[in-house]
Every structure is written in structure tokens, then in C-alpha cells.
Image (cartoon, rainbow, N blue to C red):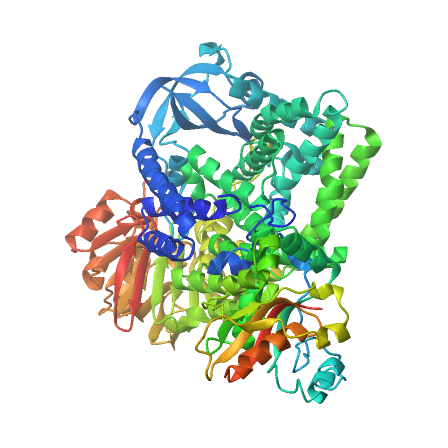
């Protein structure tokens, strides 16, 4: 099997994916094994057995991944197995309840409480806490992060929300080895935070302990966008550097064998200290395999070492297959190893760095598109600059600074971090050149992968340009795909308490965004401020638009100027080109003010305005030209699309409804986007009798403080015989249509 | 896997092509493989050695042969795989004189490729034989070993008388020696196209002697394929 373990690793990966279960992966697995049977008979049987083992193994692991707890309000013994993360007034982290891992989340009341908990809650502490066990939320928007699935993959099935955490009912148990190590890690991170200025501390903690909590959100997003994030992850480079340095040092005091053995024991310890993320585990496992072979005085091919690592990690945790870090880490390393002979033919250092960056970027491309929907034009060039900077200067310097905080080193390190952060900001926020392509369809993804593979094959035959042309062609297809799509879509996004509807006409004739949702900005005491507060725009609306590959919005319609309707507009304007903003007469000044930095034309619309586009017709039914304040002044949009009539009632109340019925006595709508999140003061009986909706869509937040939607409204809608879908229960509600008919697809039926 | 020649471990999956199309692995490490030099570019139409771009299409040696009326047209063409560089000398010594038979495996892919390119299934393979004494001395016939690498069966239509080792004679001496080859039994040669297989083409005397015997027995055309063109 020497030199051919990669075939077994591929079989294992496919088998785990097939067992998940995925029919596509099944097809790939069968074709793959058949190919091996024909072309590589000696490998077939081992590969088949590997696939069989991992298939069964995953089924067993997945079957056993179940909870023994039940939900509800209870007093429980909670063991803090890892130091909880403190972010503003929130504390969260993994704890153990009855031997089961649970995610604890707690909002602290006072600064004193926070400081006390920060000092007291070391790993190994056991507390008796009254709280509620709650199921984590599954994804409620298309393409969104599925928190429930994510936690389940970590064998976590419950959120525990304590009512209070009282020190007097806590006791220190004897910490386990892992808990001791995690305490050590926490202490190390805190020491870095104490010794270095925040900006440098963030990078240093990420480079040494794999801890990103101090990293500035904008910088992190920049690294992500520019394809440099791998530099902030602890990976092969770190481990190689550390192991070689430790070996060079150790060999002065002990024999080679003892040094290797000592490193073998220390690497898993380091893996825990470094945060045990998939890339750390990959690097440490590969390091251990190479060391173990060296100890036996053998040699192992790098590709074999990587493949064995994949096999070992899959046994350790088969769910890792779905981790972005795992996927990127393996795919890029794999591509670099296979392409290595071609790379080593390049003589100049600059050329080699450029080609290495290009290999990495090409290999990562399909994954980046799938997970992040966009690619940065700067990526390859910046990698050429940053990879040597990080691996030869910043990383060794960070280790040095953490070990001996000697002032000149600290100063140099800080200067470098400020300098690199400035570059990252320059190329991401100030002069970002990203191509938003959206998440590829399965076929699009297959095309991308095929193009990348073709590029590598052509490249090693000296035809790089042709290869790059193939990739460019695949990207062009991806770019053009929405314009060929015959389906239109109306999506009422789950933005919590707020409104946001995306209308995409077939063939992308036009994209309209009806309100953006928004979070209320509550002034908070400094200690309560979170490093990364939840933002509807940044976390829900913009990711959805990017995932759909929406680069331009033809009309951003802002019905009125309440924060839950326009709060996220600046985030949207920053991320997407908006051709024009349409708003109500009353909201015009506020919206103008808000849109000024983005130089987008803003106009007020009123009753009687209408337009047609791509087989759909739109009309503004309200308000009348005069200026009307409050919710009753919000824009009401009527649309005819996908074989249905739609009434988007914004936040109007009784008075405006009466107005509407008076002005349009024959107003009918198949779909009513219920006014004001289902408030009792809207959606009155006479209005409903006129409109006669068959479907009612309510955009409303879970557990909102206003008690929306009102029970009366629900009763009234039911009496009308309308089907009700609510974003708090059903998540986003999509209506996908072609020509004259379509279907409603709530995220959670 | 370990390299057949230097015995150091190497990664048999050396490129994307091999990995993705499941091509056969190379038995040599990239370094040993890289030390062989393929004959490429413009070839002498007769003997298959590489020529300068500006040179005439037939090399001086072959002109000599073709001008000699006794040898004109005896050999249709010769094609060889590798240049006889220092590395090849070492490998040949290891294989042929020190008897490391399995080394031949390293030549399977390139030899087959040249055979497919310049000859093909219409040709009958005949390895240049050794005399019984030499065969006993070496333990195997290197030409036969090469012929076995090709995807067609080879036939032992020729036999050889014992004589001095070729490499110890000058060109003139070689030309003037009697033809050491004779037919083995009564092979059905009539009208066949025959390709002779040998390890080295140096002056072309050996293959021409063999070709003459076959032509006289009725072969339509005789060419030769050798591993090395000295």
C-alpha cells in the first residue's frame, strides 16, 4: 500500500459521505470502487474494506449520537470542562451535564458578576445551576448556518440557559488532564492579552493558541475575504517549525530516539493547547505519523502521511468531513503535494511562491465558492506576500514574543501586525475586488471541480494558460447562471422581529429588496459590548444575497423608517450595488441621510405609481401623495407575479387599511404579507373581507417583546381560511415560481 | 514504493495524470527516471539518432552504409529509445553484465511507446540471439528480455555462432567478420515484416548482419528497435 494510501483515504471520505446519507456520494463511491477494480486491482480490496468499515463506523457513531437529557426548567449539576468564552455580557462554552456535552449560554447582569465568573470558572468547576434546557435552532434561512446540526456534530444536543450562576453552589472538582491543559491554554491567552496591545494580541493568540476572540471583526472578515485566513489557523507550517525547533534543541541533551519519542508524546498536548481545531489536528496527526515513522527509522511519502492522517481523524471524529476547516486544510495540502514535482521545477523563489499560491487558490476555489459565495481577485497576489511574511517573520516572532516579552521584539511585532492589518483593510474594505458568484448548484459545483482538475492536468503539461482559461470559463458559467434561471423567487427572510422580502424575477430581470430588517441599537455599558454583536444585515440579509449571487439590487424599497425595516440598509448598501432606493414620503429625509455615503439615488413613491418588469407588475397602493406620519405612512406594495397577486402591507394599521379599502373597494390578494408583524391594531376584519387572502405570511421574531403576532389576528386570518406561515415558526418562506405557477417552501414546514 | 535502481523510497504518484487516470506507476523514482535521456526532436530517418535542426535528413554514418552497395537497403530503419549517456552506461552494466534482470522492467513503458509510435502490430518481433556460450555466461539474453516487455509475442527465428565480443573490435573488423547469424530451423519468414530487438545500436553491424539473413530467407522488410542509440 505504500505510496497508495490516498486511494484508501478517498474511499473512506466517500463512504462517510455516503452514509450520511447522500445518494450522490453513493454514486461516486460505487464508480470509484469500480474504477479501482479495473485499473488498480491490488488496491481494490483494501479500498473496498476501508469503505465498508467507515460506512458501518459512521452509521454506528451517528446512531449513538443521541441525547439522554430532556428539555425544560431544571436544576442540574454542570461541570465546566473548558474555560467559557466571555464576550461582553455573554458567557458561553461547552459544559458537561450527566456526562453529556451541552452548550451553556448565560447573560451576566453586572460587571462584578462577570469579573467574578471570569476568575472563578476554571475547567473542573462543578456548579448546581437552575436553568432551562432548550433545543438549538436549526437553520431558519436558506444557505444559513445550521446551529443545531453544527452542535449535533459536536455531540451537543441542548442549550443550557441558566437563570443565574451562583458561586456559592459551585465546587472545584479534580480537573482531568484535558481540563488542566485547557486551563493552561486560557492562562497563556490571558498572558498574551495582558502583555500585548489588543491588535497584536489578537494575532499572537491566534497564531500560538488558535484563539481568535481578540481578533478585530473587520480584520478577520478581511483575512477571510482575501483568502488569507489559513495564515491565522494553526497548521502544518506551525507544527513543522515547532517540531524542528524543539528537535534541534532537544538533540543537544538527549539521543535522537528519546527526542523523537518525547516529541511524539508532546504533540497531542500541543494539539489541545492550540485549540484542537481540525487544521491543528491534521497538522499534529501528520507530525506524529512522520515522527513515528522516523522513530522506526523508516520514511513515509508525504501523500501517504496526509492520507493516514485523514483516516485517523475520520476514526477520531467522522463528522469532521463537513467541517470547512477540515475540507480546506486537506484539499489544499493534497493539491500541493500532488503538484509538488511540477512546482519543484520552478527555479526562482518568487515564481515558486506565486505558483504555490496559485495551486492553493485553485484547489480551494470550489470549496470557497460553496461556503463563502465569493472570491477575491487579490487573493493570489496577497498570498505571495503574506505567506513568507507569516511563516518566516510573524510566526517565529509571535512565538518569541509569547515566550519572552522583550520590549524591542514586542514593538517590532506590533508594528508588523499594524502594517499587515492596514494592508488587509486596504484590499478588503477600501479597495475590495471580490467577485460574488453565489453558491453553485450541484451541477455548477461539478463543473467547477472539473475545470480545476483540468487546470491542474493542463498545468503539469506546461499549459497553464489553457488551464486558467478553463477555470475562468467555469466561473463565467457560474456568473451567468442566474440570468438563465427560468425560476423567479419571493423570499420572506427570517430576520427576527422585522421585515425583509427579496423578490427575484425569472432570468434575473430584476431584483427587489423590500425592507432590510434591522436590529435595534441599544446603548450599552462598555463591559456589555460584544466583540461581534449579532447584526441582521451582516449575518442574515447580506449572506443570503451573496449566496444567491445577487450583485445588484434594482430597487431597494424601504417602506418606512423604523429600525426593524431599514436598520440593516447600510450593511446591504455596503455589500451590494443598489440602483435606486424607493421609500415613503415621510421617511424620505431619514433615508436620504442614511444613503448619502453610498451615493444612491433616493425617491419617494406614493399611490398610483406602477411599473412592470419581467412578466410581473407592481403598484404602490399607499400612502397618498400627502405626508403621513407613523406606521400608517408606510409604503404598501401590490404585485402580480408567479400567477398570484401579492399585497405587502408593511406596518400599516387600521386607519391606512380603511384608506385602502375606500380607495380600492375591489382589492384582492392571494398572498397577504401581514401588516406590522401581526399586531392586533392591524389586519382588521373589514380589510380581510375585502382582500380575501389565501395565504398569510407573517414576519415576526421568536419570543418578541410585543407579543406579535396577536392571537386575534391569527383567528381573523383563520376565519378567512388563509394558510398562515410565520417566520418565527417556519423560518424563511420561499415562493419559487416559473411562468404562471409556483410553490411555497417554508424552511421548516 | 522503492526505486528499482537506487532503492530509495519515492512517491509513485508523481503527477495529477497518474493519480486521476489511474495510470501505471513508474518503477523508478523521479530522479533516476530523469537521469535517462530520451531521444527526441529531429531523428535520422535511417538509424533514429537525434540530428541538429540544420543537418540533412540522413546522418553521415547511414550515408556510408547506403553508399556501400553490399549493405544498401538491408535495414529499413532503426529506432532507439534512449541516448547512451553515463547514467545509461551504468544501468546497462548493472543489468546486462551484473545480471540484474528485473531492471528491464524500467524500460517497459518507454520501449512500448516507441514501438507503438514507429512500428506497430504489423511487425514480427525477433530478438537478436546470443551464442550458447554467451547465454550461459550471462544467464539471460538482454534482447529477449526487452522483447518480452512489448505487448506482442516474439519468435526465436535466429541463432548465433560464438565469436569475439563485439565491443572489443573496431568498425572495420566488425564489418569484415563473417556473419555470425543463421536461421534457427525453418521459420515461416516469407513476406513478413520483421523488427529486430536489441539493447544497443552502435555501428549498426549486428542488426544488419541479422537483417541480411532474414532478407535472404524471404522477409519483406527488416527494421530494428533498440533501447539505446550509442
Name the residue furthest right: A408
Q: Residue at x 28, y 47 (%)?
A: A680
Q: Residue A297 versus residue A343: which sits nearer the camera?
A: A297
Q: Position of residue B30 (x, y in %)?
A: 64, 54
In the rendered structure, the answer to whether residue B102 lies left or right of residue A695 reads right
Q: Residue at x 51, y 56 (%)?
A: B19
Asked where in the image residue A156 lies, by quadrant, the reply is top left
Q: Position of residue A692 (x, y in %)?
A: 20, 61
Determine if residue A430 is in view.
no
Q: Position of residue A188 (x, y in %)?
A: 65, 25
In the rendered structure, the answer to whether residue A53 lies left or right of residue A214 reads left
* In the rendered image, the vertical position of residue A357 relative to residue A167, given as above or below: below
Q: Residue A277 versus residue A707: which sits nearer the camera?
A: A277
Determine if residue A34 is in view.
yes
Q: Position of residue A725 (x, y in %)?
A: 26, 51
In the rendered structure, the answer to whether residue A257 lies left or right of residue B157 reads right
Asked where in the image residue A298 lies, by quadrant, the reply is top right
* In the rendered image, the vertical position of residue B90 relative to residue B57, given as above or below: above
Q: Residue A46 versus residue A701: which sits nearer the camera?
A: A46
Q: How many marks?
A: 0
Quarter the C terminus of chain B occupies: bottom right
Amino acid at each position: 500500500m505504500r505510496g497508495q494510501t490516498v486511494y484508501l483515504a478517498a474511499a473512506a471520505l466517500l463512504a462517510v459521505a455516503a452514509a450520511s446519507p447522500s445518494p450522490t456520494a453513493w454514486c461516486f463511491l460505487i464508480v470509484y470502487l469500480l474504477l479501482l477494480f479495473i485499473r488498480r486491482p491490488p488496491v481494490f480490496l483494501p479500498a473496498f474494506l476501508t469503505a465498508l468499515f467507515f460506512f458501518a463506523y459512521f452509521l454506528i457513531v451517528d446512531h449513538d449520537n443521541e441525547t439522554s437529557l430532556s428539555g425544560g426548567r431544571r436544576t442540574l449539576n454542570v461541570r465546566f470542562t473548558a474555560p467559557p468564552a466571555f464576550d461582553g455580557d455573554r458567557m458561553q462554552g461547552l459544559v458537561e451535564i450527566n456526562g453529556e456535552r451541552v452548550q451553556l449560554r448565560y447573560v451576566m447582569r453586572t460587571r462584578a458578576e462577570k469579573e467574578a465568573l471570569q476568575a472563578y470558572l476554571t475547567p473542573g468547576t462543578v456548579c448546581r445551576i437552575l436553568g432551562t434546557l432548550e433545543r438549538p435552532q436549526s437553520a431558519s434561512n436558506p444557505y444559513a448556518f445550521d446551529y443545531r446540526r453544527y452542535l449535533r456534530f459536536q455531540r451537543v444536543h441542548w442549550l443550557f440557559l441558566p437563570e443565574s450562576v451562583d458561586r456559592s453552589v459551585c465546587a472545584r472538582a479534580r480537573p482531568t488532564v484535558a481540563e488542566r491543559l485547557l486551563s493552561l491554554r486560557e492562562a497563556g491567552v490571558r498572558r498574551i492579552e495582558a502583555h500585548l496591545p489588543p491588535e497584536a494580541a489578537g494575532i499572537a493568540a491566534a497564531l500560538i493558541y488558535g484563539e481568535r476572540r481578540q481578533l478585530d471583526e473587520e480584520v478577520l472578515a478581511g483575512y477571510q475575504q482575501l483568502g488569507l485566513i489559513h495564515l491565522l489557523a494553526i497548521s502544518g507550517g506551525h507544527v513543522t517549525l515547532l517540531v524542528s525547533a524543539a528537535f534541534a534543541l532537544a538533540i543537544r541533551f538527549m539521543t535522537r530516539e528519546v527526542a523523537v519519542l518525547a516529541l511524539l508524546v508532546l504533540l497531542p498536548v500541543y494539539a489541545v493547547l492550540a485549540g484542537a481545531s481540525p487544521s491543528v489536528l491534521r497538522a499534529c496527526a501528520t507530525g506524529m505519523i512522520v515522527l513515528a515513522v522516523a522513530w522506526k527509522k523508516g520514511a513515509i511519502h508525504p501523500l501517504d502521511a496526509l492520507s493516514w492522517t485523514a483516516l485517523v481523524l475520520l476514526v477520531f471524529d467522522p463528522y469532521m468531513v463537513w467541517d470547512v476547516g477540515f475540507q480546506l486544510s486537506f484539499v489544499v495540502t493534497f493539491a500541493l503535494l500532488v503538484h509538488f514535482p511540477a512546482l519543484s521545477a520552478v527555479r526562482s523563489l518568487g515564481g515558486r511562491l506565486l505558483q504555490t499560491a496559485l495551486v492553493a487558490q485553485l484547489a480551494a476555489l470550489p470549496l470557497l465558492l460553496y461556503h463563502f459565495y465569493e472570491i477575491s481577485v487579490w487573493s493570489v497576489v496577497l498570498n505571495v506576500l503574506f505567506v513568507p511574511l507569516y511563516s518566516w517573520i510573524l510566526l517565529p516572532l509571535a512565538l518569541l514574543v509569547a515566550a519572552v516579552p522583550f520590549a524591542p521584539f514586542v514593538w517590532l511585532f506590533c508594528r508588523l501586525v499594524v502594517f499587515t492589518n492596514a494592508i488587509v483593510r486596504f484590499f478588503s474594505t477600501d479597495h475590495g475586488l471580490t467577485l460574488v458568484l453565489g453558491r453553485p448548484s450541484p451541477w455548477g459545483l461539478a463543473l467547477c471541480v472539473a475545470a480545476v482538475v483540468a487546470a491542474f492536468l493542463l498545468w503539469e503539461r506546461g499549459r497553464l494558460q489553457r488551464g486558467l482559461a478553463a477555470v475562468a470559463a467555469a466561473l463565467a458559467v457560474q456568473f451567468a447562471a442566474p440570468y438563465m434561471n427560468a425560476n423567479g423567487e419571493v423570499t420572506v427572510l427570517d430576520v427576527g422581529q422585522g421585515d425583509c422580502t427579496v423578490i427575484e424575477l425569472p432570468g434575473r430581470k430584476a431584483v427587489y429588496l423590500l425592507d432590510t430588517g434591522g436590529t435595534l441599537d441599544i446603548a450599552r455599558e462598555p463591559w456589555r459590548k460584544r466583540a461581534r454583536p449579532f447584526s441582521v444585515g451582516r449575518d442574515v440579509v447580506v449572506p443570503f444575497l451573496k449566496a444567491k449571487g445577487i450583485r445588484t439590487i434594482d430597487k431597494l424599497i424601504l417602506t418606512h423608517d423604523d429600525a426593524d425595516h431599514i436598520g440593516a440598509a447600510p450593511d446591504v448598501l455596503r455589500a451590494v450595488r443598489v440602483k435606486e432606493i424607493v421609500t415613503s414620503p415621510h421617511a424620505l429625509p431619514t433615508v436620504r441621510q442614511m444613503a448619502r455615503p453610498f451615493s444612491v439615488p433616493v425617491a419617494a413613491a406614493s399611490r398610483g405609481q406602477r411599473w412592470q418588469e419581467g412578466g410581473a407588475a407592481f403598484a404602490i397602493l399607499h400612502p397618498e401623495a400627502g405626508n403621513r406620519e407613523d406606521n400608517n405612512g408606510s409604503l404598501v406594495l401590490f404585485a402580480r407575479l408567479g400567477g398570484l397577486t401579492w399585497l405587502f402591507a408593511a406596518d400599516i394599521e387600521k386607519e391606512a387599511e380603511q384608506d385602502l379599502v375606500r380607495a380600492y373597494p375591489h382589492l384582492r390578494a392571494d398572498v397577504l404579507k401581514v401588516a406590522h408583524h401581526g399586531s392586533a391594531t392591524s389586519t382588521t376584519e373589514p380589510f380581510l373581507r375585502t382582500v380575501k387572502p389565501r395565504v398569510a405570511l407573517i414576519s415576526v421574531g421568536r419570543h418578541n417583546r410585543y407579543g406579535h403576532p396577536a392571537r386575534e389576528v391569527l383567528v381573523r386570518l383563520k376565519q378567512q381560511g388563509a394558510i398562515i406561515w410565520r417566520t418565527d415558526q417556519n423560518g424563511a418562506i420561499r415562493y419559487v415560481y416559473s411562468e404562471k405557477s409556483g410553490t411555497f417552501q417554508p424552511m421548516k414546514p | 514504493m522503492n526505486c528499482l535502481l537506487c532503492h530509495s523510497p519515492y512517491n509513485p504518484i508523481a503527477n495529477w495524470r497518474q493519480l486521476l487516470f489511474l495510470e501505471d506507476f513508474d518503477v523508478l523514482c523521479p530522479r533516476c527516471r530523469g537521469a535517462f535521456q530520451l531521444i527526441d526532436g529531429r531523428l535520422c530517418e535511417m538509424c533514429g539518432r537525434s540530428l541538429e535542426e540544420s543537418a540533412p535528413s540522413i546522418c553521415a554514418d547511414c550515408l556510408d552504409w547506403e553508399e556501400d552497395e553490399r549493405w544498401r537497403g538491408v535495414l529499413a530503419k532503426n529506432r532507439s529509445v534512449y541516448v547512451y549517456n553515463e547514467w545509461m552506461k551504468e544501468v546497462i552494466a548493472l543489468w546486462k553484465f551484473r545480471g540484474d534482470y528485473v531492471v528491464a522492467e524500467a524500460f517497459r513503458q518507454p520501449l512500448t511507446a516507441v514501438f507503438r509510435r514507429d512500428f506497430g502490430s504489423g511487425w514480427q518481433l525477433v530478438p537478436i540471439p546470443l551464442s550458447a556460450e554467451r547465454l550461459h555466461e550471462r544467464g539471460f539474453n538482454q534482447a529477449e528480455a526487452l522483447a518480452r516487455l512489448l505487448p506482442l509475442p516474439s519468435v526465436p527465428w535466429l541463432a548465433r555462432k560464438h565469436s569475439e565480443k563485439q565491443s572489443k573490435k573496431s568498425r572495420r573488423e566488425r564489418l569484415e567478420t563473417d556473419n555470425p547469424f543463421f536461421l534457427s530451423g525453418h521459420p515461416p519468414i516469407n513476406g513478413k515484416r520483421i523488427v529486430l530487438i536489441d539493447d544497443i545500436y552502435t555501428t549498426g553491424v549486428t542488426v544488419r548482419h541479422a537483417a541480411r539473413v532474414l532478407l535472404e530467407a524471404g522477409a519483406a522488410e527488416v527494421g530494428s528497435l533498440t533501447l539505446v542509440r550509442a
